[in-house]
């Protein structure tokens, strides 16, 4: 999944927005996946976030997770897998969720989400 691996943590959208963008791109490419809404818990950091979106992708190596924001939000020490990783690779993270809405967002909405905020609106 080089396209998703190239996704940068510096994209200036919040966690759920980034998940929606990745979901739309995976759908556009015809890659089987499931977008979920639920919780993520980081065992080592003893922190949890109960409102979290992430993506699961079936692979020949096992179930992959796509999550670029759990570490940013919950794990300042960087002990948590990040980006695209096999669920089995990181037993430090516990994901629990239900299927979120299936319909991907449009290219126009993605462009709006990624557009810079005009200076006059920044405060």
Image (cartoon, rainbow, N blue to C red):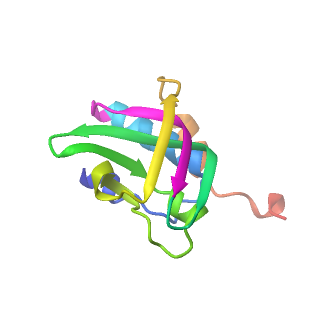
Q: Which residue is the extreme one toward the left?
A: 60
Q: Is 53 situated above or below 14?
A: above
Q: Is residue 64 left or right of residue 44?
A: left
> Where residue 35 sits: x, y (%)?
45, 34
The location of residue 72, given as percent across then percent down, is 55, 64
Q: Which residues are magenta?
A: 29-42
Q: Is residue 12 magenta?
A: no
Q: Quadrant of the C terminus?
A: bottom right
The residue shown at (40%, 57%) is: 7
Q: Is residue 14 above or below residue 112?
A: below
Provide residue 38's location: percent of width, then percent of height: 56, 38
**Residue 36 x %, y %:** 48, 34
Residue 17 is at least partly visible in this image? no
Residue drawn at (14%, 41%) of the image: 60
Residue 87 versus residue 102 in the image, above or below: below
Residue 89 left/right relative to 80: left
Q: Does residue 69 sit above or below 10 in this rendering?
A: above
Magenta-drawn stretch contains 33: yes
- The quarter holding residue 85 reads bottom left
Front-most of residues 123 and 2: 2
Name the residue nearer the viewer: 87 or 109: 87
Quarter of the image where one finds residue 81: bottom left
Q: Main secondary structure of the magenta part?
A: strand
Total number of numbered discs in the rendering: 0
Residue 39 appears anywhere in the view: yes
Q: Residue at x 30, y 46 (%)?
A: 64
């Amino acid at each position: 999944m080089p396209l998703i691996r190239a996704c940068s943590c510096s994209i200036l959208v919040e966690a759920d927005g980034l998940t929606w963008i990745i979901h739309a791109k995976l759908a556009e490419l015809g890659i089987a996946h499931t977008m979920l809404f639920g919780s993520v818990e980081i065992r080592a950091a003893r922190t949890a976030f109960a409102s979290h979106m992430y993506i699961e992708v079936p692979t020949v190596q096992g179930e992959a997770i796509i999550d670029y924001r759990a570490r940013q939000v919950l794990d300042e020490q960087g002990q948590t897998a990040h980006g695209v990783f096999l669920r089995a690779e990181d037993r430090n993270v516990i994901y629990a969720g239900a299927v979120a809405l299936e319909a991907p967002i449009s290219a126009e909405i993605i462009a709006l989400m990624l557009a810079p905020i005009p200076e006059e609106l920044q405060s």
